[in-house]
Structure formats: C-alpha cells, structure tokens
C-alpha cells in the first residue's frame, strides 16, 4: 500500500492569498501546498481510504485520479480539514460513505453539513454519510485493513491521529499523550504536524515535531501542515542538520524531510 500526501500545507494553503513573501512567490512547485490531507490506497486491491477532506479536495482528487473511496478518516472538524466534504457526494452515490472520527467531531460534521442528514427535495445532489464513532486504541477495519485511532491534542482540543500497519499520520498536534506513544510503538513511518520554526500554541514547531516524531521510534519522519516561513529546500536543510546533531552515526538508517503534495510513502500492513 501507499500513503499519498494530497496536501501538506497549513490552514491557508500556500501561496497564501495576498501574501508577497518569498515562499508564496516561489517558482519551486514543492513550495505550493494545498490544505493537509492524505490518501491510503492499494490500487491492486481496489482500496482507497481518505484522511480528511479540506477545501481543495476536488482538485486533489482529480490530481490523484481517485476513482472511489471506501471510507473517510477525519482528524478533527476545523474548516481546513472538512470543508471539502460536500465533494464526497460523487463517491457516495451507491451507498453511504463511512466517516470515522471521535464523537465530538462527528457531531460537528452533522451540524456543519446538516442538509446531508435532512429529508430534502429531489435534485440538488448531496453526499450520503454514515457517521461511525471510534474508540481510541480499538481498530476499525476498512477493506480488511485495521486502522487504529490514536488520541492527540491540538492545543486544548482532543483530536484523532491514525495508525495503519507500520505507518502513522498525526497532523495538527501540539502534544502527544503517553498512551499514544504506546499505540505507535513499532511504526516505521510517521507523518507529523510541523508548522514552522517559531513556537505555536496549537501546533508543533520544527524542534518539537522532530523530538516527538523520533521519540515514537519511527525510522522515517516527514513534516506536514507546513506554513510559509520556510521553503521546501530550507526545511530539507534544517532536517539534515537536526539529524546530524541528534543522531550522528545512527543517521544512516533514518530519513527526515518535509512532506510535499504528491509524496508517496510505502506502507506495510503486516
């Protein structure tokens, strides 16, 4: 299987509208970042699991040539993570799409997209959702694949990260509780929130993301939900220096880099 990063940017996306900074004006395509979301899929087994659906989901789906979706995993209900959910209607024509998240997030989705759950006139298409609450640490099975929801903190807000086999995706976090480190034991790959160099009240900065990311035991770590303070190339250099400083002889077995839109990560479910 592969985990494809559909979007690796912060809540504004990059370039930021109205911003004239060097990153937003960059000619490097790796500095163009849609809002954070990802896709876990196995084309051979016809399995496609979406993680979040932000405002650019339609564009991301076209670029990634998504033809179907088995289920959606939602991290939390902030606009940059769910405000593309109406575009899921094309993938829910035959049967309702299962939407997995914690109960408070599902309640927000039901309020935000209330028309989905009401009887309305014929026409004016709308998606069909089946809201599926999760229990942290208990796997849900999608196409036979066990997916484990793990608790995170986005400031004071408790949200959901996801583990599948040897890989985990934990965006929008500023604290990883001890129980989650236990649930992430044995992972090889980790995509983790790394907003910027400076501290932030509800997101890991680079140093915090690096320290927490490698504390899970992961061999390969990628930042996501990146802002426009550093270019892709500058962030690559920062990651290289951090590895050299903190691991030295051991760094040969590790990979550390910023994610980018279109990045594909090999995932083993065994």
Image (cartoon, rainbow, N blue to C red):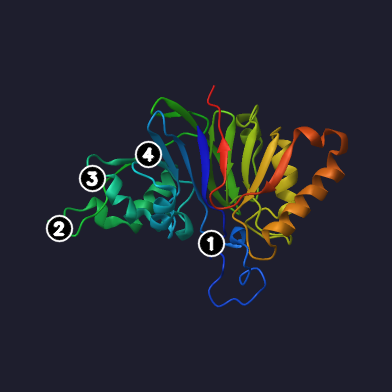
Task: State the image coordinates of residue 262 (x, y, percent, origin top left).
Answer: 53, 49
Task: State the image coordinates of residue 195 (x, y, percent, origin top left).
Answer: 65, 57
In terms of sequence position, does the residue under pointer 2 or pointer 1 come before the other?
Answer: 1
Q: Dot 2: few (<14), some (14–19), or many (≥20) neighbours within 10 Å?
A: few
Is 185 in front, or is 228?
228
* Numbered tag placed on residue 123 in the rendering: 2
Is 156 in front, or is 119?
119
- In the picture shown, does residue 119 fall above or below 70? below
Alpha carbon separation for disc pair 4 and 1: 23 Å
In terms of sequence position, does the residue under pointer 3 or pointer 1 come before the other?
Answer: 1
Alpha carbon separation for disc pair 3 and 2: 13 Å
| Foreground disc of the pair 3, 1 | 3
Q: Which SS class for mark 4?
A: strand
* Numbered tag placed on residue 93 in the rendering: 3
* Numbered tag placed on residue 11 in the rendering: 1
In terms of sequence position, does the residue under pointer 3 or pointer 2 come before the other?
Answer: 3
Q: Mark 4 = which residue?
A: 71
In terms of sequence position, does the residue under pointer 4 or pointer 2 come before the other?
Answer: 4
Q: Which SS class for mark 1?
A: loop
Q: Which SS class for mark 3?
A: loop
Q: Dot 3: few (<14), some (14–19), or many (≥20) neighbours within 10 Å?
A: few
């Amino acid at each position: 299987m592969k985990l494809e990063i559909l979007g690796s940017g912060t809540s504004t996306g990059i370039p930021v509208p109205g911003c004239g900074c060097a990153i937003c004006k960059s000619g490097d395509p790796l500095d163009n970042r849609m809002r954070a979301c990802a896709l876990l899929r196995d084309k051979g087994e016809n399995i496609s699991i979406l993680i979040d659906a932000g405002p650019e989901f339609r564009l991301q789906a076209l670029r990634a040539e998504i033809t179907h979706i088995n289920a959606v995993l939602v991290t939390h209900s902030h606009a940059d993570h769910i405000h593309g959910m109406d575009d899921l209607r094309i993938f829910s024509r035959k049967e309702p799409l299962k939407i997995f998240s914690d109960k408070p997030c599902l309640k927000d989705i039901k309020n935000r997209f209330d028309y989905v759950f009401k009887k309305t006139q014929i026409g004016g298409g709308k998606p069909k959702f089946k809201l599926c609450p999760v229990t942290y640490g208990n796997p849900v099975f999608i196409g036979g694949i066990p997916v484990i929801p793990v608790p995170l903190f986005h400031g004071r807000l408790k949200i959901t990260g996801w583990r599948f086999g040897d890989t985990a995706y934990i965006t929008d976090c500023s604290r990883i509780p001890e129980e989650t480190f236990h649930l992430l034991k044995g992972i090889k790959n980790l995509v983790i929130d790394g907003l910027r160099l400076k501290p932030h009240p509800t997101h890991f900065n680079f140093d915090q993301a690096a320290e927490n990311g490698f504390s899970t035991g992961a061999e390969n770590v990628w930042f996501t939900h990146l802002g426009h303070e550093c270019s892709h190339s500058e962030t690559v250099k920062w990651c290289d220096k951090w590895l050299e400083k903190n691991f030295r002889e051991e760094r040969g077995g590790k990979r550390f880099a910023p994610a980018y839109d279109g990045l594909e990560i090999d995932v083993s479910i065994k």
